[in-house]
Amino acid sequence: MSYIEKAQELGRALLECEETIILRAAETNLDHDQEAQRLIREFQQRFKKIQDSQEAGEEVSDQEWQEFNDVQEKMKANKAVQAYFAAQQNFKKLLEQVNTIINQVLAGNSCSSSCSGNCSGCM
């Protein structure tokens, strides 16, 4: 089996893992939460406005910063956003773990037999 086929096999396995399933469900919930979508759009608009002002050499007012921080706090308090960010973090940890294992193998190291194949004890 080629390394491309192995990578495809790994990708299919990752599609079936709990972290991916939870992330996809959280994405769907986030997409269907109108309040979360509104907050995300408002956050992006305010962020872009601040970024554009800074790039133009303009000072961002305290009121603009406060409005940006307020919408950021509201977004963080939204349950759909919280669930999505938590799921995203867990998925990121999974990918980091996979990457670490690949790097260990490339460096000539391998997991011990005591790690039971998930290598969480090896890192």
Image: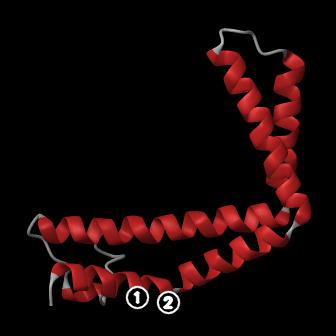
What's the residue type where badge 1 is placed? Ala
The tally of labels here is: 2
Quadrant that contains the N terminus: bottom left
Q: Residues within 10 Å of mark 1 (few under 14, many from 20)?
A: few
Q: Is residue 25 left or right of residue 36?
A: left
The residue that disc 1 covers is 13
Instruction: Say which quarter of the image contains residue 83.
Output: bottom right
Quadrant that contains the C terminus: bottom left
**Whether residue 8 is situated above or below residue 66 in the rendered picture:** below
The reply to whether dot 1 and dot 2 touch (C-beta < 8 Å) is yes
Instruction: Say which quarter of the image contains residue 62.
Output: top right
Instruction: Say which quarter of the image contains residue 57.
Output: top right
Q: Is residue 84 left or right of residue 109?
A: right
Residue name at image x 16 percent, y 72 percent: 105
Q: CA distance from mark 1 to mark 2?
A: 5 Å
State the SS at label 2.
helix
Q: Residue furthest left?
A: 108
**Whether residue 51 is situated above or below residue 17 in the rendered picture:** above
Q: Is residue 79 left or right of residue 118?
A: right
Residue 53 x/y as whole percent: 72, 18
Residue name at image x 36 percent, y 76 percent: 120
**Whether residue 113 is situated above or below residue 48 in the rendered picture:** below
Residue name at image x 12 percent, y 71 percent: 109
Residue 44 x/y as whole percent: 75, 42
What's the residue type where badge 2 is placed? Glu
Give the camera-side residue of 55 and 29. Answer: 55
Q: Residues within 10 Å of mark 2 (few under 14, many from 20)?
A: few
State the SS at label 1.
helix
Q: Residue 16's mark?
A: 2
Residue 111 x/y as whole percent: 20, 79
**Whether residue 103 is situated above or below residue 75 in the rendered picture:** below
